[in-house]
Image: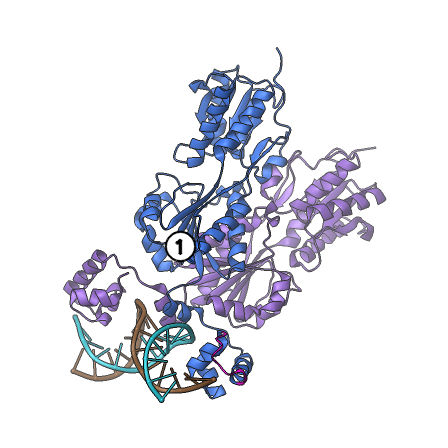
Chain colours: A purple, B blue, C cyan, D brown
Amino acid sequence: MATIKDIAKAAGVSVTTVSRALNGYDDVKESTKKRIVEVAEQLNYSPNYVARSLVMNQTKTIGLLVSGLSRNGTKDNIVMEVLTGVDHRCSELGYDMVLFNTTTAQQKQKTYAQLCRERQVDGVIVQGIKTDDPYLEEVIESDIPCVLVDIPVEAPTVGYVTTNNSKGAYEAVEHLIGLGHRNIGFMNGHNRAYVSQERLKGYEQALRMHRIPVIPAYMTTGDFDERIAEESAYELLQQSPEITAMFCASDLMAFGVMKAAKRLSISVPEDLSVVGYDDSLLASYVTPSLTTVAQDPYRIGSEATELIVRMLQDEAVDRSSILSHMFTPRESTTVVRTS
Amino acid sequence: MATIKDIAKAAGVSVTTVSRALNGYDDVKESTKKRIVEVAEQLNYSPNYVARSLVMNQTKTIGLLVSGLSRNGTKDNIVMEVLTGVDHRCSELGYDMVLFNTTTAQQKQKTYAQLCRERQVDGVIVQGIKTDDPYLEEVIESDIPCVLVDIPVEAPTVGYVTTNNSKGAYEAVEHLIGLGHRNIGFMNGHNRAYVSQERLKGYEQALRMHRIPVIPAYMTTGDFDERIAEESAYELLQQSPEITAMFCASDLMAFGVMKAAKRLSISVPEDLSVVGYDDSLLASYVTPSLTTVAQDPYRIGSEATELIVRMLQDEAVDRSSILSHMFTPRESTTVVRTS
DNA sequence: TTGTAAGCGTTATCAT
DNA sequence: ATGATAACGCTTACAA
């Protein structure tokens, strides 16, 4: 493979001149510049980014750190969409994206800083990390620029992008209340997720606002997992058969709730209205289609990329970004049955 | 950040010795090795992979080249699963994965070799490329080690991993024949996909084997797109209402067929049996659930990674790998109605 | 406008 | 067992 040295020799100039010509400096005579470019093309030259990275001390790569990307975790397409958004914006901005997959267990083996240093990324986007994951604190303390998805932490080198989760939950629950529901259950994720804390707030707020008592026995958690949610819901719906609607902190858990309802011969939406969160791919395909709060994960990814690159260029006036959500009614919710 | 130079100074040895000690060479005295390791830890050292890459002329990264990864292309989770498989096996084998997203248009801008050279990947896995994409020929001619997904081309630096698509199609059609169907339509992808050519073979073989005429009017294409397939099927089913079963070269197109059937008041599976291909996430969630030919994209990804790394180490006895598929009957197929 | 030379952090060659 | 030194391909003062 041709190097600038080869070009220099062939064009009868020094490597310095080649470097400057190819990088568009204007202190190279037009004629020599032209000659150099021609030779470069002839030799089918393309620059060695590794060498450039070494001397410039920047790799033009962004690390996308996703937590627990697993074989079966592909059930929802959200991570994929975030990734696509990151990748697209990266290539538009001239960056590469490298994927870091990490589990909580692995985080104890290798520090975040080590990971980043080794891979030599300029900045990191972190998605799906839990609030008690070891990396979170490291991210904040580290001086490596980082953007967190769905964790609103701001620090000199840390920004975030998220949506208004409490408002989304509020709207969802208010929709149920509007349909006449009063005994509304809540299937939350787990409390190590920031979004769960927020969605809980929204749920409680909506109830209080409408003078409906918040009943702890109506709340349970499904760990953002379909099977676990199914079991939790099976318990809950048996113990509190007066519940006529369930608000769930993810679509996947909503499917679990639907399955539990089926096992208990409770029909959705006639006997039980179900609301999810995310508007994942499946939501519009299942029967009945799922009422949910839509987010745009692609947008989250591209926005996070935008932000991290701005931070790398020290242009980040604002290190946070709140994206919009949209309540999306479908078939899984209906007016409460009058009995 | 600490470099081996700093360690050398602090430990009172030369950089050479530090390098050797840290890389586990056995020509370093135990005691000095121990001292060096301690100092390294104290200084919180981690190696600069960029510098190492430059001198070793290998980056320990694999490029995953996916064609046309788009915002809406996330409808099936297959790419995601391949990616997950690649990523997992990569990290097990000590490699990084960087994602290259390219469209046919972009391929005319920058050559494959340029792309690879710039990013300095050691090897490439190519997924979702069409047989007439400019890159395919380049891949074959290039000396950069490459593994193709679903394109059976072998060359000194090229291997592939795929499944037996003609056999998969054969089994699917034979299933329909076994249910009594004789007028079986075929919704193919497009002929720039190797898998489409194979699935067509399997379709024709199964019919011939059972002495059923192959009728060109029963075949159409949907470009692997749900909407296009819906329109094609709408035409087809109107023009040939005697068709009682459709075999589709992808699940997504099968959903399109189902939608067309709905518009024509043809009920699935009573009036029309539908078979897909892939066993994508949605297949088991839709109503009726979709009979399909399952592939394991995660496995395809990890196998491709395995192969490319073996090729990089010159240990590839065999540069190809055929993975298994599995016919998966569900609710969308049933015995032909007797009228 | 162009060239010389140093340096980025490693590994590898060859002495000692 | 250890160390000097060159080399990887590039950018960038500084000099001419």
Tell which of C5 and A143 is nearer to you: C5
Q: Position of residue B219 (x, y in %)?
A: 45, 23
Q: Tell me if B73 is positioned left or right of A52 in this view.
A: right
The residue that appears at 52% across and 50% down in the rendered structure is B302
Instruction: Say if A198 sits above or below B17 in the image.
Output: above
State whether the magenta stretch is mostly helix, strand or loop.
Answer: loop
Tell which of A20 and B248 is nearer to you: B248
Q: Position of residue A243 (x, y in %)?
A: 80, 42
Q: Tell me if D6 is positioned left or right of B337 in this view.
A: left
Q: Specify start and end residues of the magenta stretch as a single range.
A: B24-31
Q: Position of residue B180 (x, y in %)?
A: 59, 17
Residue A178 visible within the image: no
Location of mark 1 (residue): A92
- Report the chain holding disc 1: A
Residue B29 magenta: yes
Residue A316 magenta: no
Secondary element under disc 1, as helix, strand or loop, is helix
Q: Tell me if B338 is positioned left or right of B238 in this view.
A: right
Instruction: Say if A259 sits above or below D7 in the image.
Output: above
Tell which of B326 and A134 is nearer to you: B326
Instruction: Say if A199 sits above or below A107 in the image.
Output: above
The residue that appears at 58% across and 19% down in the rendered structure is B265
Q: Residues within 10 Å of mark 1 (few under 14, many from 20)?
A: few
Tell me the quarter of the picture where residue B178 sits: top right
Q: Position of residue B143 (x, y in %)?
A: 33, 53
The amino acid type, in three-letter code, at marker 1 is Glu
Q: Tell me if A219 is positioned left or right of B104 in this view.
A: right
The residue that appears at 61% across and 45% down in the rendered structure is A75
Which quadrant of the rendered structure holds the C terminus of chain B? top right
The residue that appears at 75% across and 36% down in the rendered structure is A262
